[in-house]
Amino acid sequence: MKGLTKKGMARLLALTMMIGCLYISQLDVAIINGESLNNNMSEFAFATKNELIELYDPSVANSKVGKIVFGKDNSGKDAEWYVLGKDSEIGGENIVIVTSRGIGRSKFWNNVGDTTYSYEAGTGYGDEPGSIKVCSNHYGISTLRKNILSLTADTTYFTAAEKSLMQPTTIKNNDMKNNLEYTTKDLLYALKGDSSDMDTLFVGSNDDKILDADKYWKDGSEFWLRSNSKTNEVYSYYAKTVVTANEKVYVSDMNVSYAKEIRVATNLDVSSVLFAAAAKTPEDVVTTGTITKYNAMKLRFDGSDKEIGNILINKVKNVLVATKEADAEEVVCVVIQGNDGEKDWYYSKVIEDEEVINISDVKSEVGLTNDINLSECKVWMEKTIDGLIYANDDVVYSSDIANVVITGIDTPTAKVQLDTEYEAQTVGIKTSSSNIIWTVNGNETELVADYDTVYTANLTLDTIYTSHFTDETKVFINGKEASVTYNNDGTLDVSYTFENTGMRKIGYLAEGYEGVYDGQPHGINVDVTAPIDATITYSQDGVEYSEESPVFANVGEYTVYYKIEKNEYETATGSKKVKINKKELFISAADQTITYGQEINTDNYIVTGLVDGDRVNGIVLAPSSLGVTNDGFITINIEKVTDNNGIDVTENYAITYTPGNLVIGNAIITYSAIGYEGNYDGEAHSICVEVTEPVDTMVTYSLNGVDYSEVNPTFTDVGEYIVYYKIEKENYDTVIGNKLVKINKIEEQSTVYEIIEGLNFEWEKGISKDVNIVCKGTFVGILKVKIDGEFIVDTGYTVGEDSASVILMSSYLNTLNVGNHTLEIMWENGYATTTFVVKETTNVEEETEPQRETEVQEELESQQESETTKEIDTQEESENKEGASELYIPDTGDVGIGGLLVLLLISGCAILFNEKMKQKTS
């Protein structure tokens, strides 16, 4: 077919079915729901699968007789079988078939006499397999059965594909010698019959397929039956037809050693059968013929997965397009079978690639007198594989084209070449018929248009085979309906008359404008080429025109109408667009990295895309977070964009804001940490951590660097101690460090100083005053005092100038126990020692009240002076010593604060006593 390749054909077939405005005109198909619609074809010419199962069953009233071809006979010719319908004892879709003539010859039994028959369990001889003596007419062990079974093993009779369709049938047989009924189960088996009914034979599992001699076996042959004689052990039955004037047919018995024809029955699985048809496959390129009742049908199997081909029928053009699958290796042919009301006929043709078959040619080649109506025919494509014919009977019919859209024909314009070709926008139109014939008043004209003339475009439309026109098809040219004439050959004659070409035209070129906002004014451009002195006016509403062409600077889409006028010329009008698109403006916040508490740089941003003269106002940068973060961002926004005149032009920009990345790191804690190193002094020492900034930090300490607490550990004993510290506050880097506390041993004192005053003193409780101990020498370092080997508190003594003297306070000495005591005064470069005795009061003289008052007054003054001196010494000493308050006070006479309270009580009494004496004196 010209211009239509095999692939193109397949695409057109698919596309045709998808076009919504087209509909597929359906023809009658061979099988719908298993029922035949080809009722005009004879039962011996065509049958559906359901008809094979039901229509030809001889046990049903008004059954039909039909034959099929299956396998070969002993001469290599097609073996023909009568179709007998379904065997109810075998599952699925199946049919019983029996040969219409002999397919070989055989004796019933080679030897005369008893023999041993080996049987299977459950076949009538018992529940277990075994063997038994039988006579010569026993079918189970007969030579006839062996020869029948050998046919299924011989590929000259049946191909492997044919054999796969044969299903075993269990049949009943008679054992004359043992007087019992037994069964055999074979793919092929002999027919049953005896002299009790000489005109009837039986087949099928239940022997329910009754074969009448007049219909099925009056061909003048003799063939063995499986039935044995009931009276003679060496006789079995056979069927015989003697073709005479009265056509005598009968069943009789005969010696088993004679050779006769073999006729057999079998059961076929027809689940994959589409239909049976008597059409022959091509012996040459084309085969045609008529079908009679003597012809046998051939089974056509489902070939939907066999890569056969596709069929398209165009009803209007009366053609059939057959396309062979590209991958099909076997011979593929297209078949048409029908009945013209007088006889059944067929047409078969080998398809090499793609064939377009004119149905009128089929009529001629078959020799028919009546026209062929494909709606009443069976059409399919087929190929043969291993003796089986596979068919594809899916047919696609051409689609009606309701509307045709033609474009590409411009309205005729004076002095302009007329179009000679058009474009059909509808699927299914031939593009080769694209010539246009132009006429004026019915006469063909030149191809250059003139002024003031009416032109008509004339064209003829044709379709490809997948589509066809109808007498209701409409054609539209440039959106307007044209005049249509439907032709008998399926083409359309189309004509369309255009409007008058009109007056002389003004030559001009009009251009609009489209661009991006740049702050400059823009308008349309109209350039008149002829006549040069034409007048151009402009309008924004299409009503009011002026010679001033409007211009625009801001973003928007504007329509400008124009009008060009000149005497003796047709006024030209039109419009063009001025489209100003937004300019892209990019405003980006820069990435910033700061520390906690630090503000972002609000001037750190980038602006790109501004038109010269425009500026950005009110840029605002804002952090997404004030706390420490690694994935923060800085948003940026603006108030507006203005031009040189301060006019807001923000809408002329497509602004893209890009936030900057923000990283806020921890701030740094400012602090100082100091360790300690000094000689053992009995005081508690530790490290010192002071935080300058920020406030409210948390300082914790640890001795192992793991477990921290807010308690700063202290140390008194000699040794080296590492103290770990940690300073923490949210949003600040945690500080972790350590300092050393080192307390050294006091070096052995090599200098023993001389006590020149207060050596070996005695002190009497309640009477003696403070004791002044004066030493001789040059002293270094802090002075310490031990009594009885233990340091005493600094409230128990005062230190004199240059650390050369120590005053032991009577308030302290009064706390000691009566007895001997040792005194040690220590400096860094030496020491001095002595002993002293504390005694009880032994003799207290009577004192007059004035004397006692004087003593008490002196005592108070001395005590106040001592306390003042001690406070000064204590303050000075505290600058150089730590932890003196923790020094041990000896137990001897230790009354501590209690002693002081007693002393204060005595002082109070003295004051009261003094006041009383003054009153008496007065």
Image (cartoon, helix red, strand yellow):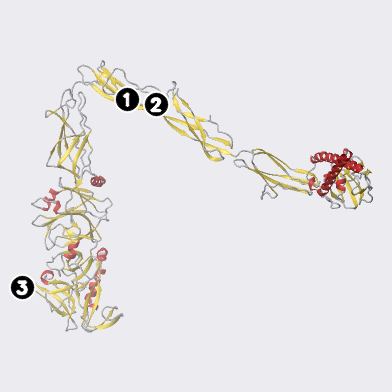
* Amino acid of disc 1: Gly
Compute the Cα span from label 1 to label 3: 106 Å
Where is residue 794 shown, x and y percent of the image?
83, 44
Q: Residue furthest left?
A: 245
Q: Are marks 1 and 3 in contact (CB under 8 Å)?
A: no
In depth, the one of 789 and 324 nearer the eye is 789
Q: Quadrant of the C terminus?
A: top right
Q: Is residue 799 visible?
A: no
Circle nearer the N terminus (1, 2): 1
Where is residue 784 shown, x and y percent of the image?
85, 45
Circle nearer the N terminus (1, 3): 3
**Image: 62 above or below 620:** below
Question: What residue appears at the point 16 percent right and 28 percent down from the top-left corner?
Answer: 455
Compute the Cα span from label 3 to label 2: 113 Å
Q: Quadrant of the N terminus?
A: top left
Residue topped by disc 1 = 512
Is disc 1 placed on a helix, strand or loop? loop
Where is residue 100 shown, x and y percent of the image?
15, 68
Mark 2, residues whose alpha carbon is within 10 Å: few (<14), some, or many (≥20)?
many
Label drawn at residue 293: none
Where is residue 210 shown, x and y percent of the image?
15, 72
Label drawn at residue 246: 3
Is disc 2 placed on a helix, strand or loop? loop
* Amino acid of disc 3: Asn
Is disc 3 placed on a helix, strand or loop? loop
Mark 3, residues whose alpha carbon is within 10 Å: few (<14), some, or many (≥20)?
few
Mark 1, residues whose alpha carbon is within 10 Å: few (<14), some, or many (≥20)?
some
Label drawn at residue 517: 2
